[in-house]
Each structure stands twice: as C-alpha cells, then as structure tokens.
Amino acid sequence: MTTKQIKDIRRRLSDECETLIGSINRNRQAVEEITLENTEDEADLANISHDRDLLYNVHKGGFERLRSVREAIKALENGQYGECISCGNDINKKRLEAVPWATTCIRCQEEAEAEQVSSRMSLSGLDAEAPEF
C-alpha cells in the first residue's frame, strides 16, 4: 500500500469512528429521555418498550461496528491491515473499499454469521436439522 492509500484509509476509519461515537452518544441520550417518561397507559408503555428495544439493537450494532473500526485502525498501525483475523488470508480489495473496517474475509464472515444463526436457533429450541417423528 502506498502512503497516500494508508492516509486515505486512516481518514475513512477515523471519520467512521467519530460518526459512531456521536451516534452512540445520541442513542444514550434518547434512552435516558425514554426512561424519564412516566405513564401508565398500556399503549404508551408498549411504545416505550418497543423504542427501548429498537435503540438497544441500534446501540449494540454501533458498538460492534466501533469495535471493528478500532481493530482495523490497530491493524493499519501494525501493518496487518487487509489481513483476515480468522484465517490470515488477504481480504479482497473490493471488500475493503466498501467496508474499510472489515477485519475478516468474506468466507470467514459468512461462516461466523452462519454460526451465529445456528447458535440462535439452538438457543430458541430450534434445530437446523429436520425434526424426527
């Protein structure tokens, strides 16, 4: 990678980091505002609960992306940017252009996502295999 490419990647990662931190802080404030509402109306309580769940999921996703961005910055500083943290192979350049904070290659990312789905199915009592009768 050229010095210019490294600077561009560092700038994109830093910008994403700042954006995520701002978003996470706004979500925290929104959760606090929702918590301050005091009502006994069931519809309002349902809406508040739904809003909290939604904000929690957005917040969680923001933290996960922030972790990935910080890992990518660390990899850039260590000269390991573009190397999959799971298998060690190079991450496709098009993937890094689209998602500069990607820390895994597409194959490892797909495997991790499939494992998460399988884990969620197991936790919910569903098996990936067909039930026996």
Image: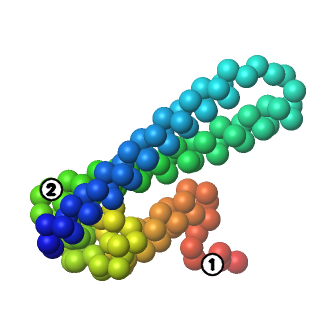
Is residue 111 visible to the viewer in this orientation of the structure? no
Nearest the viewer among 67 and 129 is: 67
* Residue 99 picture quarter: bottom left
Which residue does the numbered mark 2 point to in the structure image? Answer: 77
Q: Earlier in the sequence, mark 2 or mark 1?
A: 2
Residue 7 falls left or right of residue 12:
left
Residue at (56, 48) in percent of width and height: 58
> x, y percentage for residue 44?
82, 32
Q: Is residue 102 above or below residue 90?
A: above
Quarter of the picture containing the C terminus is bottom right
> x, y percentage for residue 46?
79, 37
Which residue does the numbered mark 1 point to in the structure image? Answer: 130
Q: Is residue 15 above or below residue 27?
A: below
**Mark 2 or 1, closer to the camera:** 2
> x, y percentage for residue 25?
48, 35
Residue at (55, 56) in percent of width and height: 123
* Residue 125 picture quarter: bottom right
Nearest the viewer among 10 and 47 is: 10
Mark 2 residue element = helix
Q: Amino acid at mark 1?
A: Ala
Q: Amino acid at mark 2?
A: Glu
Is residue 95 visible to the viewer in this orientation of the structure? yes
Neighbor class of circle 1 (other Cα within 10 Å; few <14, some 14-19, many 20+) is: few
In this picture the colour scheme is rainbow
Q: Is residue 108 above or below residue 13?
A: below
